[in-house]
Image (cartoon, rainbow, N blue to C red):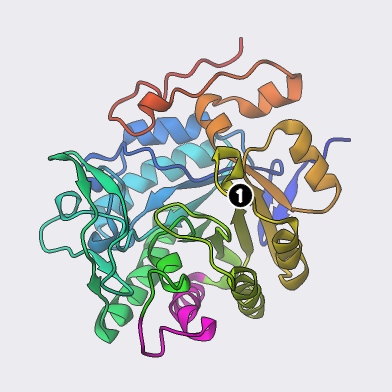
Amino acid sequence: MSQLFSTATLGPLTLRNHLVMAPMTRNRAPGNVPNELMAEYYAQRASAGLIITEGTSPSPNGLGYPRIPGIFSQEQIEGWKLVTSAVHAKGAMLFIQLMHGGRIGHPLNLPAGARILGPSAVAASGEIYTDAEGMKPYVIPQAMTDGDIKSTIEEYAQAARNAIQAGFDGIELHSANGYLLEQFIRPNSNQRKDHYGGAIENRARFVLEVVDAATKAIGKERVGIRLSPYGIFNDMPLYPAMEADYTYLARQLNVRGLLYIHLVDHSAMGAPEVPDSIKETFRNEFNGKLILSGGYDVTRAESDLAEGKADLIAVGRAFLANPDLVARWKSGAVLNEADMSTFYMSGSRGYTDYPVLG
């Protein structure tokens, strides 16, 4: 019998299957407020057991990209209620991914008064798109003071409370892909000399304090985290102590009794391969649920579940292009191809107009 399509448990939740729709930035929130179009998009894909939303900022400072949603205002909470009620009506569970861009952002993408922050005043290499002026080089972030760190931790905690108010089943802390939480973990972006820099015990401190604040706010059974060991996206180069550092992190997250760890493997998109050893380390060191993502097809998803390598399998682009992915995988139907030219534009094209079977 297929494990992929059978019910799964995730803490207090029962999921209709072992398939997770992975978080994907889609830039469809003008003014950073969720809307009816977003509710339609997520509801179309609610045959997944669990949906994790696109990265959503806990703070005006974290809105690094154009048209990404936040969850720090009442208007945003009300917007997200459209999404949670539409998805729940279709039977899926829904977590919001909290993503603070940190140094991955540009002042042209931020509201008035917001600042580009980072662990250290070190700019990421490369450029970022702005609606106002097109591509712009990354700016040097302001190195966060102790006060900035305290207030940002509280922003995460309040965002977690707001998420529950908006009807979400839980939150995923985005500590992957070169955004703020990972910027503290990685030695290239974190060059601090205080108790948040240097040894991994210090570089992991901010992430673990955010975890503690979020679990205190809404309960550890509602909090997961996403990590990308061996990810190089957003100027996060590989370094020799990577495996040891992430092993430390796995142990610390286990002590905190977190609901799940979501490990990203972007090798299917050209990133370095994540060694099986690091996935096994998380399997052995962490007692919560393990979600694996990265270029899965139905065969490999079934295989990794059967072999106990993961508890749930997350899928991104295939869900983006196939609202009815579960039905297609079950029946062996051909999949729609994702149109990459529409990934980050405005409007419904390449968003809610992918065809479904029958």
* Magenta stretch, main secondary structure class: helix
Q: Residues within 10 Å of mark 1 (few under 14, many from 20)?
A: many
- Residue range corresponding to the magenta coloring: 192-218
Residue drawn where x is 31% and y is 56% of the image = 104
Amino acid found under the numbered disc labelled 1: Asp
Between residue 230 and residue 282, name the one nearer to us: 230
Query: Residue 267: horizontal and vertical position, in percent?
Result: 60, 44
Instruction: Determine which quarter of the picture holds residue 121.
Output: bottom left
Between residue 342 and residue 151, name the one nearer to us: 342
Whether residue 345 sits left or right of residue 243 in the image: it is left
Relative to 84, residue 162 above or below: below
Is residue 351 at least partly visible in the picture?
A: no
Instruction: Determine which quarter of the picture holds residue 67.
Output: top left
Query: Residue 241: horizontal and vertical position, in percent?
Result: 59, 73
Quadrant of the snapshot with the C terminus: top right
Query: Residue 293: horizontal and vertical position, in percent?
Result: 63, 47
Q: In the current view of this chain or complex, which residue is farthest to the front? A: 240
Residue drawn where x is 49% and y is 70% of the image = 218
Query: Can you identify the residue that label 1 sits on?
Result: 265
- Is 210 contained in the magenta span? yes
Query: Residue 247: horizontal and vertical position, in percent?
Result: 66, 73
Residue drawn where x is 47% and y is 72% of the image = 185
Whether residue 338 sits left or right of residue 30 in the image: it is right
